[in-house]
Amino acid sequence: MTDTDIKKGLAGVVVDYTAVSKVNPDTNSLLYRGYPVQELAATQSVEAVAHLLWTGELPTGQQLATLREAERENRALQPDVKAAIDLIPLDAHPMDEVRTAVSVIGARETRGTLNVMDAVGTPQQNLERSTRLFGELPAIVAYGQRRRRGLEPVEARDDLDYAANFLWLAFGEEADEVVVDAFNRSMILYAEHSFNASTFTARVITSTLSDLYSAVVGAIGALKGPLHGGANEAVLHIFDEIGSAENVSAWLDTALTEKRKIMGFGHRVYKRGDSRVPTMKAALDTLVAHYDRPDVAALYDALEAEFVARKGIYPNLDYPSGPAYNLIGFDTLTFTPLFVAARVVGWTAHIMEQQASNALIRPLSAYNGPDERHIEGYVPDTSTI
Ligand code: CMC
C-alpha cells in the first residue's frame, strides 16, 4: 500500500448511493429529492420539506396536515428530558444538552427493546421516531437558551406552525412574519447536505443495526465540531473580534499571519461557493433591514470581499446564518443546536435509507506502528513507583 492509496479524510471517496440529496459543485447546486433547495426555501415550510426528505415526495394537503398534527403532538418539553437537561452545568456547551436529551428520548422511546437484534426497528417505527424527534427538538433547544437566561420554559403554541412556534418557545413572544420567514428558510437550508461528517456518522452507526436515536446522538457529536456545525457560532466570535467593517483589513492581516482558519469560509465539496449561501444571504438582508442593522451587513460584506480577494475561498452556509441568528436574538451558543433541530430531518432520512439497503461500514487502514514485537523481554520500569 502506498501513500496515494490512503484517502485521508475520505476526500473524493464515493462510498454509497443516496436518493436523498444531490450536491453538484460544478453547477453550484443542491437538490433535495430532485428539487433545488433555493426553490424549496422560497416556497415551502420546514414540515413540507421534512415530508419530502423522509418520503421522497412533497406532501399532499392531507399528508402535510397529518405531519403537522404529529409534530404538534410532540412539541411539549417532556419531564424526563427537562430533568436530564437540568442536571447539566449551566456552563457546559448546549450541544451537550441536546445530545443528552436525544439519548434520554431514545431510552424512553425504545423501552422494552431488550433483544439487541430488534434495536433497528421497522420502517414505520423509524418514520414515527423521526417525526417525534423533529417535534421534540425545538422545545429542547429553546429551553437550553431560556435556562441560561434564568427563564422558565414556555408552553408550545398549537396555533403556530413549526418555525413560528420554535421562535415562540425560544423568546416567549410571537415573532414578526419577516423573522419567521427568514428562520424557516434557514431551517430548510440546514436540513440536508448528503454525506457530510455528521450524516456519515449517523450512517456508520446505523450500519451496525443500532437504533435511530444512537445514530442521531453520534451525529450531534460530529456536528459540534467547529470544522462542521460549530462554524456558525465561530463566525459570531470572529465578528465580535473584528468589531466593525473598517477593522477587517488589519484583523485579516493578523489572522492570516497566524495561519488561522476563518470560520464560515471554505468547503470540502464546493470550491467556487456554497449553493445555499445566496438564499441565506437574502434572508440575512431582510433581517438587516427589519432590525435596521446596516453595520452587520457592512462587516459581512467587507470580510467576504477581502477574504475572497486574498484567498479565493468562498463563504459557506454558516457565514450568513450566524449573523442572521444573532439578529433574531439567539445566543451565539444556541446556533449549533438550531442546526441540530434542522439537520435531524436529513440525518433521519439517511438513517432510514441506510436501513433499507444496509451494508456494515467498515473501511481498512494502513498500519504504520511498530513492527511485530513480543512481551518476552518487557520489564516494567518500577523506579518511579
Ligand atoms: N480559512 C483559512 N484557510 C482556509 C479555510 C478557511 N476557512 N478553508 C480552507 N483553507 C485553506 C487551508 O488552510 C488549506 O490551505 P493550505 O493548502 O495552504 O494548507 C486549503 O485551504 C485547503 O483547506 P483544507 O482544510 O485542507 O480543506 P478541506 O476540504 O479539508 O476543508 C473545511 C474544508 C470546511 C474543513 C475548511 O474550509 C475549514 O476549516 N473552514 C472553516 C470552518 C467552517 O467554516 N466549517 C463549516 C463547513 S460548511 C458547513 C458544514 O458542513 O457544517
Image: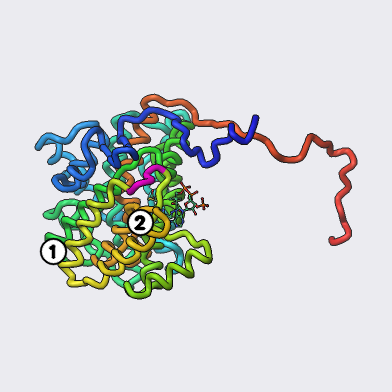
Where in the figure is residue 304, as x and y percent of width and height? 33, 61
Where in the figure is residue 182, as x and y percent of width and height? 19, 57
- The residues bearing labels 2 and 1 have C-alpha atoms spaced at a distance of 22 Å
Q: Which residue sits at x=46%, y=26%? A: 359
Provide the secondary structure element on which disc 1 rests: loop
Q: Counting residues from the N terminus, which is met first, the one under dot 2 or under dot 1?
A: 1
Provide the residue designation for mark 1: 176
Q: Which residue sits at x=46%, y=36%? A: 12
Q: Is residue 270 magenta?
A: yes
Q: Is residue 131 magenta?
A: no
Quadrant housing residue 144: bottom left
Where in the figure is residue 314, as x and y percent of width and height? 36, 53
Which of the image's four quarters has the N terminus? Answer: top right
Instruction: Please name the amino acid that badge 2 sits on.
Output: Pro
* Magenta segment main secondary structure: loop
Q: Are marks 2 and 1 in contact (CB under 8 Å)?
A: no
Camera-nearest residue between 205 and 1: 1
Question: From which residue to which does the magenta span run?
Answer: 269-273
Instruction: Give the colouring mode of the picture.
Output: rainbow
